[in-house]
Image (cartoon, helix red, strand yellow):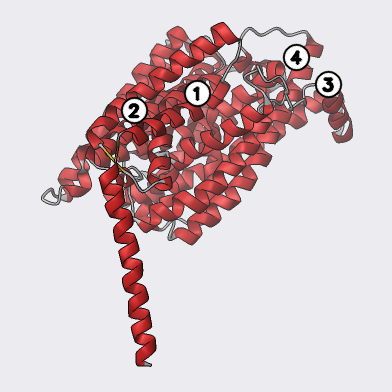
Amino acid sequence: MSSSLLAIVFIAYTLVIFTVTWATSRRANNDTYFIGNRRSPWFVVAYGMIGASLSGVTFMSVPGNVQTQAFYYLPMVLGFFAGYIIIATVLLPLYYRMQLTSIYGYLERRFGFFTYKSGASFFILSRTLGATLRMFLVVSVLHTFILRQFGIPFWVAGLIFVLLIILYTFEGGIKTIVWTDTLQTTFMLLAVVYCIITISKEMGWDFSEMVSQLSNSGYMKWLNTDWSSKTHFLKQFLSGVFVCVAMTGLDQEMMQKNLSCRNLKDAQKNMFTFSSIIVVVNFLFLSLGAVLAIYVQQKGLQFSDTDLIFPTVALQHLGSVAGLVFIIGLISAAYPSADGALTSLTTSFCIDIVGLEKKTAWTEKKKKKVRYSIHLSFALVFLLLIIFYNAVKNDAIINLVYTVASYTYGPLLGFFFFGILTKYQVRDKYMPIIAIASPVLCFLLDLACTRYLAFGFGFTLLIVNGTLTYIGMYLCREKDKVRRCVFCAKLQKIIKLFLSLQNTIKV
């Protein structure tokens, strides 16, 4: 396929996105950037979140992984569904009740300064690493199949992608993202469906024949009962629950979209709707992977990197239209993840680290200037990390993303669950040490179990990490404070009972 044609499609699609950006970012202020003035329609947020949660990683890595891991990813997807229900019923009410702009403000009110800063810092670290891994995969494909043909080096390809993300999130922030994500989700899903249909036609299948071929292929196996395997179905399901709670419910990027809804009821509608759709969409991606695996097997194609199966087949074997649809789908999957990450990181750093909301003496103009500089700084970090990943990549990105999350989201999981499930206060100044020690202990534990017991934790390492953080907080609890807290609660109940009896007597 002509690289020039692909480049034209890429530019045209980007111009469409910038048109939406211009329309949504007029008269934008800091409140627009951070929470969309709390006016986002819930159904638009729910639909757009599909693209934001899946990203370019899902678009290529999930289908590619089917060749080696069949449908073993499916139990994790079912775990996601359970996780979204927890988010909707436990976390969202908490965030709305406290009227938070950054969800990590909860940690400051619940535990104190150091816990708050530790939680926000771990989010910034985790989202920066995860987002750039996703972006790297997309830049890699754009460079391999389009830009390299014009003699453009990889670092320039990365620079072009990052610049585009900067330009259309710079002013409108979350308000712009809510609407552009909707457009991009539509194109991404259409691309997946079109590619499934096109490959099926290439193989001479109608719908019933395709279903029959997939059922008999062995690629749809999803219950791995080997307990020592990292993809054991129970490990995958539990990982899905906690990965979802951590990477969505405790993630500023995903929650920022929910907090832009008009009220809690709308945000919960969004989450319940989204949780159902996301299972169907992931099954669609897995089905695409199975179709691709059969196609590759029958054509005798060989791939050392499973992430390249989908782009190679779409761009080099299915004709011009499929190639163009793939590029549009890939960009549509990539932009929502990248733009949301840049906006949420800017928001978290402004609110949690700089304390922009507390700078009451600062003018709106000065706050905006600070926000701009932080926005650009994160964009530069993105570019440097993308270039670094290009030098060291050695694993399917979908696995790498969740592995990174297992280490970096664990402390957040422990902090929030300890705050929600107990009434204890903690020795706040020790929380940074616990937040660092837990991932280190997890790494050593996983290394020892793999080497000496032939047991892999897989993505359940996130649960272990959160549990270690929880235990550390329990050991550093302040016993006297919780006793006073419980005593005050009981005293309040007695007073309320006394007053109600007094009113009854008067009547």
Q: Where in the figure is residue 191, as x and y percent of width and height?
A: 65, 33
Q: What amino acid is labelled 4 in the image? A: Val
On the image, numbered disc 2 is attached to which residue?
435
Q: Secondary structure at mark 3?
A: helix
Vertical comparison of 299 with 272: above or below: above
Q: Residue at x 52, y 33 (%)?
A: 243
Residue found 65% across the figure and 17% down from its top: 229
Residue highlighted by disc 4? 296
- The CA distance from mark 1 to mark 4 is 25 Å
Q: Which mark is residue 401?
A: 1
Q: Residues within 10 Å of mark 3 (few under 14, many from 20)?
A: some
Task: Identify the mark at residue 217; answer none if there is no mark.
Answer: 3
Q: Secondary structure at mark 2?
A: helix
First reached walking from the N terminus: tag 1 or tag 2: 1
Q: Earlier in the sequence, mark 1 or mark 3?
A: 3
Note whether 109 is above or below 188 in the view shown.
Answer: below
